[in-house]
Image (spheres, rainbow, N blue to C red):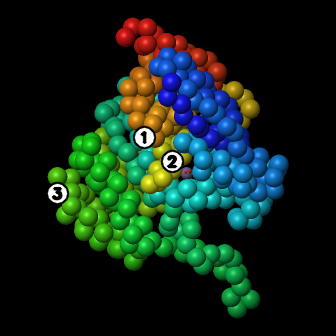
């Protein structure tokens, strides 16, 4: 039986609740399709600070390096909000992304037909939306030096540095062209090249690379305009490629189109390693209440099967099962609309698992 070794980093807040759901789904598809998954847990984020004094303990990093893939929940929360930037839970997440060189973060925003009315946008605008944001994940203002709060003439000054090397831009841009080639062959590159030199370089490299992908149509948008177009004409996008900070912001915006941030999965991919995590955070406002939407994490696990293990059919089946559970009316509170069944994390997970069983029985 093919066997895969998965590092599981549950993290903080709703992290443990939603990762548990994804593990249950993986166990079930393992049973139904004949694969064995072994799960080994590691600490990251706030829980790692509390237990080991470090948001990314060495043993967690080693566990991830020797695993076939990593599944992560979320990190952070009010308990650790007063720590300095370099000691916060979020530093653990940034550290693992950098250490595994996960430079391309794939964030698909796809509208499930039963959820069209969960979006605050008009149905006609939302219908048919299916795009993917490719967010560069290991560079930009997130990692640039110098950074810090310094003294200048007796006053404090905060400094962060937006920085991209040519090679860092080129590899994520290439990856995006390749993804576009396998989809609708349309790439939107997002920058702020009317103001920023980093962005002017970004645009230049997209233009250079487009010569190698003549079958892919390229559009350039400034990030402010793109933020507007995403809510105005979401269904016109196919692949959007952008830097780390713009991608962070645009992907949360995209979540509104799909009904909730609780719906958006992601895959963080490098040339050697990959990590799968929902786009959302630790949602401290609902942690421990049993009402978090597990779908983003379940779909992240599905992306793991697709991208890391090549199990396309199994991944398709999980996505179909999510759709069926939604068609059957199951909704966590974040996607609830009148006339549907409001359920908690556990019931939503069970609804997806029972849809999986039905799908396998009927085939
Ligand atoms: P958040 O994504 O945690 O929450 C934003 C809003 O969305 C909240 O109202 C929350 O309840 C809701 N939400 C998020 N996920 C949900 C789900 N699965 N089901 C239902 N509702 C959901 O963002 P925030 O509140 O700005 O940040 C909270 C903490 O999470 C911070 O410490 C932040 O740094 C951290 N964070 C971590 C990650 C990550 O680990 N990848 C991502 C974003 C934020
Ligand atoms: C995300 C989060 C992280 C980011 C934070 C928690 C470091 O917002 O994964 O989108 O900004 O990358
Ligand atoms: Mn974010």
Nearer mark to the viewer, of 1 and 3: 1
Q: Residue furthest left?
A: 214
Q: Indicate if the residue with disc 3 has its beta carbon within 8 Å of ligand 2.
A: no
In this figure, which residue is indicated by the disc labeled 3?
A: 214
The mark that comes first in sequence, 3 or 2, is 3
Residue that badge 2 annotates: 274
- Between residue 167 and residue 47, name the one nearer to us: 167
Q: Residue at x 83, y 48 (%)?
A: 51
4, above or below 152, in the image: above
Quadrant, the C terminus: top left
Residue 156: give x, y in percent of width and height.
70, 81
Q: Is residue 336 visible?
A: no
**333 horizontally vs 204: left or right:** right
Contact between labelled residues 2 and 1, with CB atoms less than 8 Å apart? yes
Residue 352: image x %, image y %? 52, 19
1 or 3: tag closer to the N-terminus: 3
Q: How many marks?
A: 3
Q: Counting other residues with Cα less than 10 Å from the Cα at mark 3, is it few (<14), some (14-19), or many (20 or more)?
A: few
Q: Secondary structure at mark 3?
A: loop
Residue furthest top as drawn: 362
């Amino acid at each position: 039986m093919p066997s895969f070794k998965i590092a599981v980093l549950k993290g903080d807040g709703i992290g443990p609740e939603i990762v548990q759901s994804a593990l249950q789904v993986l166990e079930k598809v393992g049973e139904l399709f004949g694969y064995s998954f072994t799960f080994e847990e590691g600490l990251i984020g706030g829980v790692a600070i509390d237990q080991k004094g470090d948001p990314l303990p060495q043993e967690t990093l080693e566990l991830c390096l020797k695993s076939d893939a990593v599944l992560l929940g979320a990190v952070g929360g009010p308990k650790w909000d007063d720590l300095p930037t370099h000691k916060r839970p979020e530093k653990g997440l940034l550290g693992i992304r950098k250490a595994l060189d996960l430079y391309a973060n794939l964030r698909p925003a796809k509208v499930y037909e039963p959820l069209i009315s969960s979006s605050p946008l008009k149905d006609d605008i939302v219908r048919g939306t299916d795009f993917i944001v490719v967010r560069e994940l290991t560079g930009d203002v997130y990692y640039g030096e110098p950074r810090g709060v310094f003294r200048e003439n007796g006053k404090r000054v905060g400094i962060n540095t937006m920085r991209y090397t040519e090679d860092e831009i080129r590899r994520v841009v290439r990856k995006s062209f390749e993804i576009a080639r396998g989809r609708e062959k349309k790439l939107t590159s997002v920058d702020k090249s009317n103001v920023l030199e980093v962005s002017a370089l970004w645009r230049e490299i997209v233009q250079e690379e487009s010569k190698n992908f003549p079958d892919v149509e390229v559009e350039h948008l400034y990030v402010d305009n793109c933020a507007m177009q995403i809510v105005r004409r979401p269904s016109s996008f196919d692949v959007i490629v952008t830097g780390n900070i713009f991608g962070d912001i645009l992907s949360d915006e995209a979540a509104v189109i799909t009904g909730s941030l609780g719906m958006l999965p992601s895959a963080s991919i490098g040339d050697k390693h990959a990590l799968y995590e929902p786009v959302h955070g630790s949602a401290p406002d609902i942690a421990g209440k049993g009402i978090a939407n597990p779908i983003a994490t379940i779909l992240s696990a599905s992306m793991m099967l697709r991208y890391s293990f090549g199990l396309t059919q199994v991944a398709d089946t999980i996505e179909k099962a999510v759709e069926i559970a939604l068609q059957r009316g199951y909704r966590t509170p974040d996607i609830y609309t009148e006339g549907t069944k409001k359920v908690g994390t556990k019931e939503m997970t069970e609804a997806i698992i029972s849809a999986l069983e039905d799908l396998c029985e009927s085939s």
